[in-house]
Image: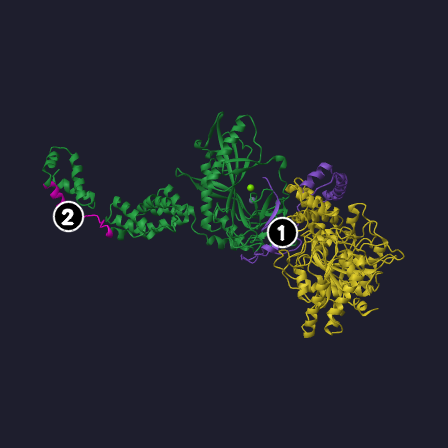
């Protein structure tokens, strides 16, 4: 393995340590990842590669490292989901309608990373406007999962919507990447790609400068290969932002420190409603294994009930499209992005949006418009908001009895490109285990738990109380330790 | 819950999304399928349950009234696909 | 609105009988604030296009609204000024529709839970009577940008400077019954907003715009279908729009037609309005609570603090003027309609004969202002100078007739009354000795007239008065002249 190859396999924590020790420079580390990015272009994980910017940032990082003035992420390469507005770097949210849009501003979360010394290597492919669970809805084409079924070299999906973010970290193109999670868009791809994906509590990270999908659900989060790395990156992303009225003003704890605590004596809830009819035995087995691992480390497993779980997915598919239909109204071909000229204004709007948006985005805008339209508002939107209250209540009652909840992340392992595409709802079912925590605004993490018979990774999900990311990381760390997941994907750098 | 093509047209018009005749039927069927699927919620008892306003329990933060932004004419206009001098432009609107 | 306030003078006679006109006004008043409702961009009028625009106002991807504290306070302040209920919790919702000067594709407004609920405004009518007009609600919302349709043959230009500026939409109950009442309502509302300092009320600059909701019915019958005439931006236009729409509706109904519930656009040039949006094109705004914002909570302590800081409002001032200065209600109403004018009057009246002061302010002074087209601030005669003139009338230095002459001179030169009196030696002669000497002389030199008078021809008396005034260049006190003549001619 070449030097450049091997260093891309280090964890972010290790890179950080070795950079400070000057074992290698940020420039070398960054170049190694840029090479990996180039080698694995076939994954189609990136929408924009920012090599020059990366090397310039690495240069600056090396100077600080030389001065012994390293910041928490000094010199560490990180890639960014194309949903984050990045100043001077094209940002399209995976959509044709934003082709050529170059933001004159930097999202709060990415700005915080750069202020901690991180190095930006590029923008990552994703489902258009974060709508999808397979990364099949991108204007840039699908992303390939670095993992393949044993004895089958068909391209599999990386999950979605943060498919590029998950693929890049799994393939060692970046030690960490940023994604966003609205109904599972970080956790499900993390599970499909055998890495760690964290969705913080709603309000923990600023949404300012992140292209909005569903404002009451969207939340930024990190992809990493270890729980510790997740804690490190989250610690730099989190915090109150006066420019986001829904971000919460409370101190950011030392997430890494939470990992020192074991799970002895913790009560871990297992929601019986998550044992859905027709659940694959492999998922069932994985889940059981997770319970055993925690029990072996001194935690108590307790079955709980989250009675409204079955209604979460339909509720989500009212709330999210409704908000999206309004959030995406600004893409009208007037101030930025693509424009299809026509004689009259309505024609311009309809042509620009009719050709600028992809099929799934159009479907969701139409559904959202429908459920908000006169006569249906109460039957659909308000009904869904009421059920959302019930779902959140289920969780708060459960958390009176348990410290955290253990569940599968996704109902299946990665599937082949083109599978589950026959009708929209089949695809929506991918989020069945992730959506409830999203609706309740709770923190949740997906940690690799093992492989299926045909060699694909599966994730375990830990859900915590609002703003108890520490507990989520702590339990996730215990699972990680027990799972000892060291398998590597077939398509990988170095 | 079935959706007819007239409804699809009406909704698409509200959303300012052009639908090609070819898409119409498929969309009607897809939207109908989705609506049918979410219709199960009608059975849920939400008597006396308040709609959720925000997933986060926090107070609205209010800004001081100071001029801290603007004066960025070029930044505001530079991404416009079409513009004339310091204006955005659209086909003439006749009210 | 109960039918008790349908006075016959408000009924409009049609061919088929009398009609009652039912009017409600929606006023959009720009909140006086340095920055916009949800962004830190400036709100000044008349800036270079698209310079007072933040990326939030232009609805760039990922931009989020942050509420302006002062706008909340201004809305509460206005609510208190309208004797209205302040809602401790209100909610911002999105009103969704596509228009090029609405960058986000939705307007952030308040719908089901406005920040201010029901209140009242007392209007003052020309006959000196007053009437209560109900306020339905006041809510905060963003203004849209400006579409310029006349800059290019094929294109509409968009300027977003106004986009996001805070507006208060003040909705009245359908309590008005005539153009006069609507005018009085707008005049009073504007006065209240100006006294409160929550809106400059400048209709020419669009800081105050009205939508007129109007329907007609037979007296006492159920409400008819209303139309909404949009964006009428002067009080005169509002009255024109009401006149036009009233006659239009009467014509339609008397011809056996029906009124469409429609939005109409007023044309200031022609004084007419035309249908803007037909029913089938009606909007479906798809209101829903804005997920980027949380409910606005108003602390009762803040309400009390604002209440305590309220100035004396027009109605209170009017009552005080009537009470303290014994003014006629109509005069008091005219004086308080404009805060500057009310303050001016108080300055003139203090320590002086208030009736004389109001006669002068409402009479010669305002006439002179209008004639010269100058405002109180820039007028050549300030309150102190006018007061000085009134003092000279009070101490008999000047007769009323001389005072008018002096006032004109003051207006031309800006000098004080005293200065002009000295220059022109205009001092009234009140020394009976001096007047008596003149009178004796005139009697001595005109025996013939004396005879006529003795003969009983009293008309000659006026001739003697005239001679005496002439001899004193009009400075003799007319009363004393009469007195002395009667004595000397022992009549
Ligand atoms: Mg209106
Ligand atoms: Zn309005």
Q: Is tag 1's residue or tag 2's residue first in the polypeptide sequence?
A: 1
Prevalent SS, magenta region: helix
Chain coloured purple in the rendered structure: B
Q: Chain of mark 1?
A: C
Q: Picture coordinates of residue C377 (x, y %)? A: 39, 51
Which quadrant of the rendered structure holds the C terminus of chain C?
Answer: top left
Q: Is residue B17 above or below residue A486?
A: above
- Which mark, by number, is residue C434? 2
Of B54 and A269, which appears nearest the observer?
A: B54
In the image, taking residue A125 as reference, residue A333 lies left or right, namely: left
User: Which of the 4 quarters of the picture holds residue C7?
Assistant: top left
Of A37 and C391, which appears nearest the observer?
A: A37
**Pointer 1 and pointer 2 on the same chain:** yes
Kindly tell me whether residue C331 is visible in this rendering.
yes
Chain coloured yellow in the rendered structure: A
Chain coloured green in the rendered structure: C
Circle 1 residue: C59
In the image, taking residue C107 as reference, residue C455 lies left or right, namely: left
Q: Picture coordinates of residue C276 (x, y %)? A: 58, 37
* Mark 1 surroundings within 10 Å by alpha-carbon count, few (fewer than 14), some (14 through 19), many (20 or more): many
Of B48 and C346, which appears nearest the observer?
A: C346
Provide the secondary structure element on which disc 1 rests: loop
Boundaries of the magenta span: C422-444
Of C222 and A13, which appears nearest the observer?
A: A13
Q: Picture coordinates of residue C130 (x, y %)? A: 42, 40
Q: Chain of mark 2?
A: C
User: Which of the 4 quarters of the picture holds residue C468?
Assistant: top left
């Amino acid at each position: 393995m070449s030097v450049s190859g091997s260093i891309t396999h280090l964890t972010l924590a290790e890179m950080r340590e070795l950079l400070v020790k000057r074992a290698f420079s940020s420039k070398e580390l960054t170049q190694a990842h840029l090479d990996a990015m180039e080698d694995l272009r076939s994954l189609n994980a990136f929408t924009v590669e920012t090599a020059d910017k990366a090397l310039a940032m690495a240069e600056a990082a090396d100077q600080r490292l030389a001065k012994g003035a390293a910041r928490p992420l000094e010199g560490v390469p990180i890639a960014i989901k194309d949903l984050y507005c990045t100043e001077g770097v094209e940002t399209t949210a995976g959509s044709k309608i934003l082709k050529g849009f170059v933001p004159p501003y930097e999202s709060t979360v990415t700005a915080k990373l750069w202020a901690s010394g991180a190095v930006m290597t590029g923008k990552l492919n994703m489902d258009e406007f974060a709508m999808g669970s397979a990364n099949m809805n991108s204007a840039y084409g699908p992303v390939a999962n670095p993992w393949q079924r044993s004895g089958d070299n068909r391209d599999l999906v990386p999950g979605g919507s943060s498919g590029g973010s998950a693929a890049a970290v799994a393939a060692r193109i970046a030690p960490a990447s940023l994604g966003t999670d609205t109904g599972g868009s970080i956790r499900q791809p993390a599970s499909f790609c055998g890495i760690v994906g964290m969705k913080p509590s709603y309000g923990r990270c600023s949404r300012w400068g992140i292209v909005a999908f569903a404002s009451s659900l969207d939340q930024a989060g990190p992809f990493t290969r270890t729980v510790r790395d997740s804690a490190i990156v989250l610690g730099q992303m989190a915090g109150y932002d006066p420019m986001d009225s829904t971000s919460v003003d409370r101190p950011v704890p030392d997430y890494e420190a939470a990992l020192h605590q074991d799970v002895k004596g913790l009560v871990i809830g297992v929601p019986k409603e998550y044992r859905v009819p027709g659940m694959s035995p492999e998922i069932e087995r994985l889940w059981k294994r997770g319970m055993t691992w925690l029990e072996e480390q001194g935690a108590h497993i307790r079955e709980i009930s989250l009675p409204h779980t079955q209604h979460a997915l339909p509720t989500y598919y009212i709330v999210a499209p409704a908000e999206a239909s309004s959030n995406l109204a600004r893409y009208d071909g007037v101030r930025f992005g693509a424009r299809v000229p026509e004689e009259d204004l309505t024609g311009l709007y309809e042509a620009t949006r009719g050709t600028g948006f992809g099929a799934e985005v159009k479907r969701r805008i139409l559904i959202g418009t429908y459920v908000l339209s006169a006569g249906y508002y109460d039957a659909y939107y308000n009904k869904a908001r009421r059920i959302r209250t019930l779902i959140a209540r289920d969780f708060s009652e459960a958390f009176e009895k348990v410290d955290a909840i253990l569940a599968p992340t996704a109902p299946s392992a990665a599937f082949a490109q083109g599978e589950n595409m026959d009708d929209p709802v089949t695809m929506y079912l991918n989020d069945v285990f992730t959506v409830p925590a999203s609706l309740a605004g709770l923190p949740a993490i997906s940690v690799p738990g093992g492989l299926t018979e045909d060699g694909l990774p599966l994730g375990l999900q830990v859900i915590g109380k609002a703003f108890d990311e520490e507990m989520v990381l702590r339990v996730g760390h215990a699972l990680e330790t027990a799972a000892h997941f060291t398998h590597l994907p077939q398509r990988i750098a170095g | 819950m079935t959706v007819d093509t007239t409804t699809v047209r009406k909704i698409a018009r509200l959303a300012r999304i052009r639908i090609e005749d070819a898409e119409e039927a498929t969309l009607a069927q897809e939207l109908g399928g989705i609506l049918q699927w979410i219709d199960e919620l009608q059975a849920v008892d939400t008597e006396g349950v308040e709609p959720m306003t925000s997933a986060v329990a926090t107070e609205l933060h209010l800004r001081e009234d100071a001029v801290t932004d603007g004066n960025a004419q070029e930044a505001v206009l530079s991404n416009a696909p079409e513009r004339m001098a310091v204006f955005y432009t659209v086909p003439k609107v006749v009210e | 609105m109960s039918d008790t306030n349908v006075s016959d003078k408000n009924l409009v006679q049609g061919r088929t009988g009398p009609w009652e006109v039912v009017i409600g006004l929606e006023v959009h008043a720009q909140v006086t604030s340095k920055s916009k409702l949800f962004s830190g961009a400036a709100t000044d009028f008349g800036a270079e296009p698209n310079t007072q625009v933040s990326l939030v106002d232009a609805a760039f991807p990922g931009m989020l609204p942050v509420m302006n504290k002062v706008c909340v306070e201004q809305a509460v302040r206005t609510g208190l000024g309208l004797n209205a209920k302040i809602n401790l919790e209100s909610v911002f919702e999105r009103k969704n529709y596509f228009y090029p000067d609405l960058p986000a594709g939705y307007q952030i407004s308040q719908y089901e839970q406005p920040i201010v609920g029901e209140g009242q405004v007392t209007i003052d009518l020309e006959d000196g009577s007053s009437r209560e007009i109900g306020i339905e609600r006041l809510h905060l919302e963003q203004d849209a940008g400006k579409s310029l349709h006349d800059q290019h043959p094929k294109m509409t230009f968009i300027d977003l400077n106004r986009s996001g500026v805070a507006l208060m939409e003040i909705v009245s109950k359908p309590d008005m019954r005539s153009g006069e009442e609507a005018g009085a309502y707008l005049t009073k509302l504007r006065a209240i907003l100006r006294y409160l300092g929550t809106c400059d009320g400048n209709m020419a600059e669009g800081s105050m715009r009205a939508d007129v909701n109007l329907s007609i019915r037979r007296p006492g019958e159920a409400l008819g279908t209303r139309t909404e005439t949009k964006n009428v931006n002067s009080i005169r236009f509002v009255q024109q729009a009401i006149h036009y729409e009233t006659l239009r509706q009467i014509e339609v109904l008397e011809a056996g037609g029906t009124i469409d519930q429609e939005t109409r656009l007023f044309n200031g040039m022609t004084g007419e309005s035309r249908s803007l949006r037909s029913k089938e094109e009606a909007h479906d705004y798809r209101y829903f609570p804005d997920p980027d914002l949380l409910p606005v909570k108003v602390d009762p302590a803040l309400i009390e603090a604002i209440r305590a800081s309220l100035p004396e409002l027009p109605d209170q001032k009017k009552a005080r003027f009537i009470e303290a200065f014994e003014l006629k209600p109509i005069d008091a109403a005219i004086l308080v309609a404009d805060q500057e004018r009310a303050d001016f009057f108080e300055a003139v009246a203090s320590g002086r004969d208030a009736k004389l002061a109001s006669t002068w302010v409402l009479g010669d002074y305002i006439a002179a202002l209008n004639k010269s087209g100058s405002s109180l601030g820039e007028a050549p005669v300030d309150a102190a100078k006018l007061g000085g003139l009134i003092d000279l009338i009070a101490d008999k230095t000047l007769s009323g007739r001389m005072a008018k002459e002096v006032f004109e001179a003051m207006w031309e030169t800006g000098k004080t009354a005293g200065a002009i009196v000295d220059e022109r030696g205009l001092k009234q002669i009140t020394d009976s000795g001096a007047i008596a000497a003149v009178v004796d002389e005139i009697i001595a030199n005109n025996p013939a007239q004396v005879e006529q008078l003795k003969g009983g021809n009293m008309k000659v008396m006026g001739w003697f008065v005239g001679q005496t005034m002439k001899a004193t260049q009009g400075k003799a006190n007319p009363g004393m002249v009469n007195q002395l003549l009667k004595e000397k001619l022992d009549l």
